[in-house]
Image (spheres, grey):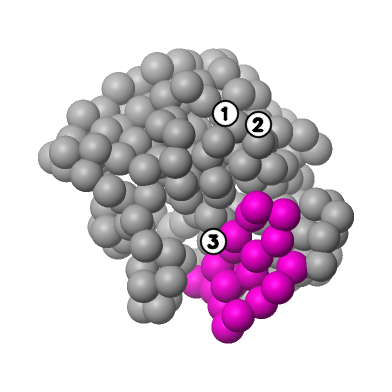
Amino acid sequence: MSPPDAHFWTERWAEGRTAFHQPDKNALLVAHLDRLPKGRVLVPLCGKSHDLAYLRDHERPPFGVEVVEQAVRELFEALGVSPTREGDLVRGAGVSVFLGDFFAPTLPALAGTFDGVWDRAALVAIDPSAREPYRDRLLTLMSHGGTLLLATFDYDQDLRAGPPFSVPDDVVHGLFGPHGTVERVAQHAGTLPTPDGTAPVMENVYVFVKR
C-alpha cells in the first residue's frame, strides 16, 4: 500500500493515536444501511470498528481487512471471543477479518466476492496515488450489481496534511463513474482540526452500484 503504509498505522495504534476510531457504530452507516443489500459486506481498513458487529446483527455478514494486528486483536476482545486463525484469516462471533494488506495478492482468493462494501475509513486514509489501484481492487471484490456505501471528506487540503485526505466530488465520480452509477445521498458540514485551528469540511455519502 502506498504511504501512509503499514508501519505508519502500526505506530499510530501502538501510540494510542486512534482518534479516527469511533466509540459506537457509525451514524452514517445506520442512516443509510438500507442502501447496502443483505449479504456479505466488505469493510476495508476496518480497525476495531463497531460497524462490523452492527452489520453482522443486520443480516450483512462482515468481512474486514486490516493490516494492524493490534487493531484486530482489540476488535475480537471487544466482541468477547477468542477467534480462530487460519493463515491471514481471523474469525469469531460471526465476523471475519483478513489480517494483511488490502493489496495482498492472496486476498481475492480468500475473500471471494461481496454484495456490499462499507468504506468509511479507507479511501480517505490511503495516499491519493493509490486511489485507482484501490478502486480496481474493490471492483475485483464486488459482485455484479454490488453496492459501495462510501463516506468521504471534502476540504481544502492546503490547510492540513492527510490522512484523512480530501476526496472531492469530482474525484469520486472520476474513480467510480465509468464503472457503474454514482449518487451522492447525503452531505454534512463540519470541521477538522488543523495546525492553526480548524478547517470547514463537508462529509459526503455516496452510493456506487457496479454495473
| x and y percentages locating residue 56 in the rendered image | 62, 42
Q: Quadrant of residue 192?
A: top right
Secondary structure type for disc 2? loop
What residue sits right under mark 1 in the picture? 29
Residue 51 visible, this orientation: no
Cα–Cα span, label 3 and label 1: 18 Å
* Contact check, label 3 and label 1, Cβ < 8 Å: no
What residue sits right under mark 2 in the picture? 26
| x and y percentages locating residue 131 in the rendered image | 34, 54
Relative to 144, 106 lies left or right: right
Q: Quadrant of residue 109?
A: bottom left
Mark 2 residue crowding within 10 angstroms, few (<14) / some (14–19) / many (20+): some
| Circle 3: residue type | Val
Magenta-colored stretch includes residue 86: yes
Cα–Cα span, label 2 and label 1: 5 Å
Which label number is shown at residue 135?
A: none
Residue 184 visible, this orientation: yes
Mark 3 residue crowding within 10 angstroms, few (<14) / some (14–19) / many (20+): many
Q: Nearer the viewer, residue 150 or 204?
A: 150
| Circle 2: residue type | Asn
Relative to 148, 16 lies left or right: right
Q: Residue at x 38, y 50 (%)?
A: 114
Q: Nearer the viewer, residue 160 or 56?
A: 56
Which circle's residue, 3 or 1, is located before the other in the chain?
1
Q: Which residue is drawn at 55% across and 46% down?
A: 61
Q: Give the range drawn in magenta.
A: 83-101
Secondary structure type for disc 3? strand
